[in-house]
Image (cartoon, rainbow, N blue to C red):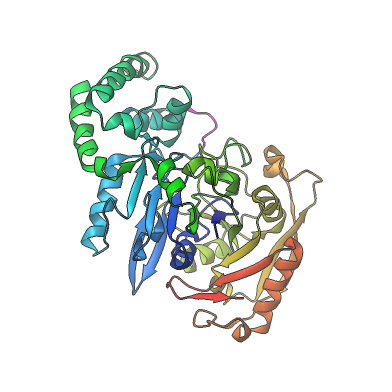
Amino acid sequence: MNTVVIGLQWGDEGKGKIIDYLAEEADVIVRFQGGNNAGHTVVIDNRKFVFHLIPSGILRKGKVCVIGNGVVIDPKILLEEINFLKKQGVSISPQNLKISFFAHVIMPYHKLMDYFREEKRIQKIGTTKRGIGPSYADKFSRCGVRMVDLIVPKIFSLKLKDNLREKNLIFKNVYGRRGFSFKKIFDEYIYYAKMLKPYCCDTLEFFHKHRRLNFLFEGAQGAFLDIDYGTYPFVTSSHTISSNAVLGSGALMLKIDRVIGVTKAYTTRVGEGPFPTEVRGKISEYFRSKGKEFGATTHRARRCGWLDLVMLKEAVKINNVTDIVLTKLDILDELEEIKVCIGYRNKIKPYLFSHLAKVSPLYKNIKGWNASTSHIRNYNDLPFLAKKYILFIEKFLRKKISFISVGELRNAVISK
């Protein structure tokens, strides 16, 4: 069975843990978009692992993890991640980690350009300034450096010289900044190329050869950060939705059997942009403190709010979701009353995101259960009011909630 795991909100839904959980039954785990602006967290035996580029399934023995062609790679960050995991006793080799030849490389000028563009904007996007957007821009401008280019010195040298000829003029004439040294970048990145070359391969051939195995596709960010279907322009620079799984991975011959959408029991987002159910004051601080709502990659405090079922229903439709995972249910344990957005007073289509900043949400008030759920592993043992909350979400979305996460630990998952 081939499964895609996708975020249904603005990212940070807890996908890393769910991918690690589902990876036990998979053979190959594939990351198909985004860069090191995403962070997936898995906690095992009180040890925290934060992944930025490597699929979370690397912690499962006997699995193959693939970084697909739709990912943009900062080679320095990837090497740091590989070395960190090795020090933690995680086995990583070209046999269990593969990088697509066609994945694009984030260069130093991408990161600086990301920073300067954001600084000059009147309307701030809230970019992580890690060079993700400029790298994707170069990809579609047909001047990007791919992994297959990076590992061949002559080709890399030619492409780098060509790019610096343009980029250095931009830095000088637009931003009034000094440009980059060819030699310094070349020497640094040739070292990265030497270290990463053993992992690089023709993933299309690999997928075709192993097409009868069970694949798990790992999405980064969330549905409403998709470059087309998200809250544009406050989005990421790639397609985060499920239909990009085969294109961004290179597994073009595979059929997707299941799309699992992951949502928190409430809502968060990082950066700028509309957020209809955002709350402030004590309840916001409660979510942020109890839910540890700080970015795994950026450490930025997340904006917090109530669950928005209107947007969630749209995400289910966009991603062709078959079933749902509800995470962080335990964060609601101490609340006497829980609000859920079931509509907007302003009559707009959910996809008219430019209007979202002006909408006023309609809430359904649900009584809290005031009991701990973090120790529960059987659905029938959940408090009655917690099950009522879950059932309400299922009925609104007309989709089954198959799994419920009630804590950080690997086994804190309830199968329904």
The quarter of the rendered structure image containing the N terminus is: bottom right
Residue 319, position in %: x, y?
64, 50
> Can the viewer see residue 39 in this picture?
yes
User: Is 285 located above or below residue 252 in the figure?
Assistant: below
> In this view, which residue lies farthest toward the bottom?
381
Tell me which corner region of the image, top left, top right, bottom left or bottom right, holds residue 154.
Answer: top left
Q: Which residues are magenta?
A: 118-125
Question: Is 3 or 106 nearer to us in this picture?
Answer: 3
**Residue at x 23%, y 65% (from the top left corner):** 89
Question: Is 357 or 160 nearer to us in this picture?
Answer: 160
**Residue at x 67%, y 54% (from the top left corner):** 316
Residue 174, position in %: x, y?
40, 16
Q: How many marks?
A: 0
Tell me which corner region of the image, top left, top right, bottom left or bottom right, holds residue 160.
Answer: top left
**Residue at x 40%, y 35% (from the top left corner):** 102
Tell me which corner region of the image, top left, top right, bottom left or bottom right, holds residue 362.
Answer: bottom right
Q: Main secondary structure of the magenta part?
A: loop
Question: Is 248 or 212 nearer to us in this picture?
Answer: 212
Indicate whether residue 279 is drawn in magenta: no
User: Is 295 located above or below residue 246 in the figure?
Assistant: below
> Can the viewer see residue 180 in this picture?
no
The quarter of the rendered structure image containing the C terminus is: bottom right
Residue 16, position in %: x, y?
45, 60
User: Is 350 located above or below residue 3 in the figure?
Assistant: above
Residue 79, position in %: x, y?
26, 46
